[in-house]
């Protein structure tokens, strides 16, 4: 139904990861690493591993942390952030990457500051969209949780109104105040990539689908309805998050099985238990 993808947040960008993806049937990856590791990336090595193992680099998640250094919605950081992100776009497009996922802001953002931060983010996104287009690429604005810009349908629509070439990365565990199905139907063909994970609808958790409360059949149905054509790309760590108890670490095979079960209308294989009485920030 959809190619199965995996964010490299699951593991480091190593030959072992690419090799294990190939063996499991994971066809695409998103490069996503902390700022320090991104700064030290060998892009030619990434291209070589992609070619060697036949795993396409579908997208690149632009760094967003620390908020004190990178934030396109802050007047005092926007120019510096844009320059930094454009440098990454230059290097990544040089090896054929053509989709860049971006956070429109850091947090927290007080209500009285949202309008100003929104205007700054839109100007930044317009600049980045034009820069990416010149290099044959697109910027994909991600929906975000809590007080971040992009926490609602209206937020995302306003952000991408800055430039017709802006698109959307739909993260299935970030909408804390609105329904995922409504989001898909409202953004339609602007959604070109996904970050798939589950949550308890209290805060983002990045659990495996079936471990939380998302209505996956309805989400999948809505994506088909709007003609989504990108991959089913998981953004979940292999390890043990502090919010859930699992029998073991996840593997690429677990993601392939999870996606296949959903696509075939089967019940999810579950080998975990969310920790009881989870707090907001646990």
Image: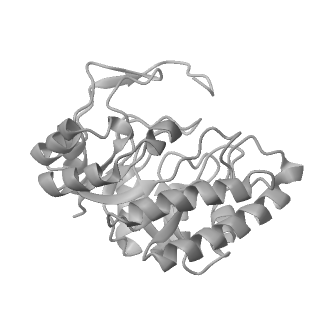
Q: Position of residue 253 (x, y in %)?
A: 17, 39
Q: Quadrant of the C terminus?
A: top right
Judge by depth and name the residue closer to the eye, 158 or 178.
Answer: 158
Q: Position of residue 192 (x, y in %)?
A: 42, 68
Q: How is the image coloured?
A: one colour
- The residue positioned farthest toward the left in the image shown: 23
Judge by depth and name the residue closer to the eye, 40 or 15.
Answer: 40
Q: Quadrant of the N terminus?
A: bottom left
Determine whether, in the image, residue 139 is placed left or right of residue 259: right
What residue do we see at 42% from left, 46% from top? 32
Q: Quadrant of residue 158?
A: bottom right
Judge by depth and name the residue closer to the eye, 116 or 269.
Answer: 116
What residue do we see at 50% from left, 77% from top? 133
Q: Position of residue 195 (x, y in %)?
A: 42, 51
Q: How many marks?
A: 0
Residue 142 seen from this side: no
Q: Quadrant of residue 65?
A: top right
Q: Position of residue 119 (x, y in %)?
A: 79, 65
As drawn, 78 above or below 189: above
- The residue positioned farthest toward the right in the image shown: 112
Residue 43 seen from this side: yes
Judge by depth and name the residue closer to the eye, 49 or 166.
Answer: 49
What residue do we see at 80% from left, 56% from top? 75
As drawn, 138 above or below 30: below
Determine whether, in the image, residue 7 is placed left or right of residue 141: left
């Amino acid at each position: 139904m959809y190619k199965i993808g995996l964010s490299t947040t699951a593991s480091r960008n190593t030959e072992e990861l690419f090799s294990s993806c190939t063996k499991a049937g994971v066809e695409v990856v998103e490069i996503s690493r902390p700022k320090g590791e991104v700064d030290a990336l060998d892009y030619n090595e990434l291209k070589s591993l992609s070619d060697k193992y036949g795993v396409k680099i579908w997208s690149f998640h632009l760094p967003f942390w620390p908020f004190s250094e990178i934030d396109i919605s802050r007047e005092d950081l926007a120019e510096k952030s844009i320059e930094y992100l454009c440098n990454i776009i230059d290097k990544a497009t040089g090896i054929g990457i053509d989709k860049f996922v971006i956070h429109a802001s850091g947090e927290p953002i007080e209500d009285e500051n949202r309008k100003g931060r929104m205007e700054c983010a839109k100007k930044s996104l317009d600049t980045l969209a034009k820069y990416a287009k010149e290099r044959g690429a697109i910027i994909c604005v991600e929906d975000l949780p809590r007080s971040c810009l992009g926490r609602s349908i209206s937020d995302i629509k306003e952000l991408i109104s800055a430039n017709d070439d802006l698109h959307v990365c739909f993260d299935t565990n970030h909408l804390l105040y609105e329904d995922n199905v409504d989001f898909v139907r409202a953004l339609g063909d602007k959604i070109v990539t996904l970050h798939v994970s589950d949550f308890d609808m209290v805060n983002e958790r990045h659990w495996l689908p079936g471990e939380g409360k998302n209505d996956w059949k309805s989400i999948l149905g809505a994506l088909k309805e709007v003609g989504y054509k990108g991959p089913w790309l998981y953004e979940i760590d292999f390890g043990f998050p502090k919010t859930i108890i699992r029998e073991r670490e996840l593997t690429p095979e677990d993601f392939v099985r999870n996606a296949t079960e959903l696509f075939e209308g089967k019940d999810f294989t579950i080998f975990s238990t969310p920790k009881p009485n989870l707090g907001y920030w646990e």
